[in-house]
Image (cartoon, grey):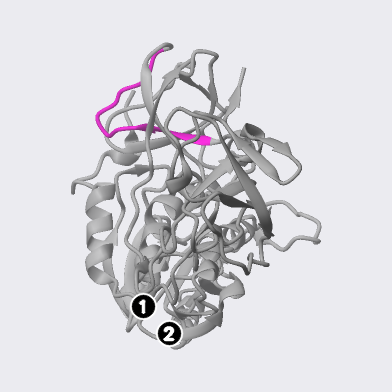
Amino acid sequence: MIDECASEKKQLSSIAEALARISSAIEPVTETERVELKHGLGRVLAEPVYSAINSPFERNSAMDGYAFSSTDLIPDQTMSLTQVGISWAGQPYQGSLQSGQCVRIFTGAVLPVETDSVVMQEQVQVKASSIIFPAQTQAKQHVRAAGEDSKQGDLVCAAFKKITAIDLGLLASVGIDRLIVTRKVKIAYFSTGNELSALGQPLVSGKIYDSNRYLLSGLLSDVCYQVTDLGVLADDPLQLEDCLLAAAKNHDLIISTGGASVGDADYIKDVLARCGKVDFWKIAIKPGKPLAFGNINDCHFFGLPGNPVAVAVTFQHIVAPALEQLCGTAMSQPLQLLARCTSVLKKSPGRQEYQRGIVSQANNGDLVVVSSGQQGSNILSATSLANCYIVLPIECSGIQVGEQVRIELIKNVASSVISY
């Protein structure tokens, strides 16, 4: 089996080589904005954030129980202490403790100054105001030290970190209510093709519905992006050039789909060369070989293939890392896992291939993957069923049932890894 699309006079760039060239061409946006913490999820920090306080702010109890001083403990003997008060969460005990005394305390409540230990309520016997402690009571247990999570002045989130839900909680816990983040990356996208028809219109012979713009709309649904849909452009080089030049004036990046191959109506590469610069065209990836990357002045450009599965694959493996760098974070490498393949997979050497699969976990914990169906770059139905890519390297010439393969979980899909 021969991959005719991989037979080129000039060797195609590998994915790693393409990403290296993109990385060297892209500078992160430098403009910033201030946002309230509640609006910070998913944004990229423009500067480091330091703790404004000790967290916890004061010593407090990790359990419901009784706070006491370890100096009252008698090794290997029970002891009886007198309860003299209660320390509630949000309402500390205000008195002073003497030797032989303890206070009832609840989780999160401040420990009285004289105490350094907490015993769980399940471990004591209560007889009126007398609290009987077991012989095995441990000193200095169940106490959260002031600043044990973060001390005042500690770095809590480094610059260029993308804020997660956990980060929101962490930042709130140390008193941070506003963040300085990089501004949103301005992205424009459009589809090309005389054959494309708008949704809501009846199809006539020779026409297809434009699915790529809806696919890209989903892939670009990130709070770090400010996205503009430029619609559908005809296969007209003058119209394409006018669109690129206009969009480049007020966007950081433009993405097109279709018109990037070698057909008589594929104008993207030539138009890009006329109004800007082509950094590279075609890479050793399947689906998605006819991909163009370049720039129009300070605006970066990706010309993606027209087949929708190729759009998904090239976006997630080529465009998404570029957008990470543009936002200020480092280009990430997809996590790859090993799985046993239960399908015969056809492939010829020449390009790294991303076949669509369904991964599940066997009872013994091993990952098992099966092809999700037809692998044509126009087959969205099989891609919709998939929850992973089966990654077949350039030199691979096919996979037999039972062989180990590498997989990557697909982002932005509802499917999950299931057990059977």
Residue at image location 44% in from the left, 77% down from the top: 52
How far across and down, in percent of the image, does residue 193 sit? 56, 62
Q: Dot 2: what SS?
A: strand
- Membership of 7 in magenta stretch: no
Res. 228 in view: no
Residue lying farthest to the front in this orientation: 99
Q: Nearer the viewer, residue 95 or 345?
A: 95
Q: Are marks 1 and 2 in contact (CB under 8 Å)?
A: yes
Say which residue appears at 29% left-offset and 48% top-offset: 15
Q: Quadrant of residue 233?
A: bottom right
Q: Which mark is residue 47?
A: 1
Q: Quadrant of the C terminus?
A: top right
* Mark 2 lies on residue: 32
> Where does the magenta region start and end?
388-400
Q: Looking at the picture, how far across and down is residue 261, in whole percent? A: 40, 55
Q: Residues within 10 Å of mark 2 (few under 14, many from 20)?
A: some
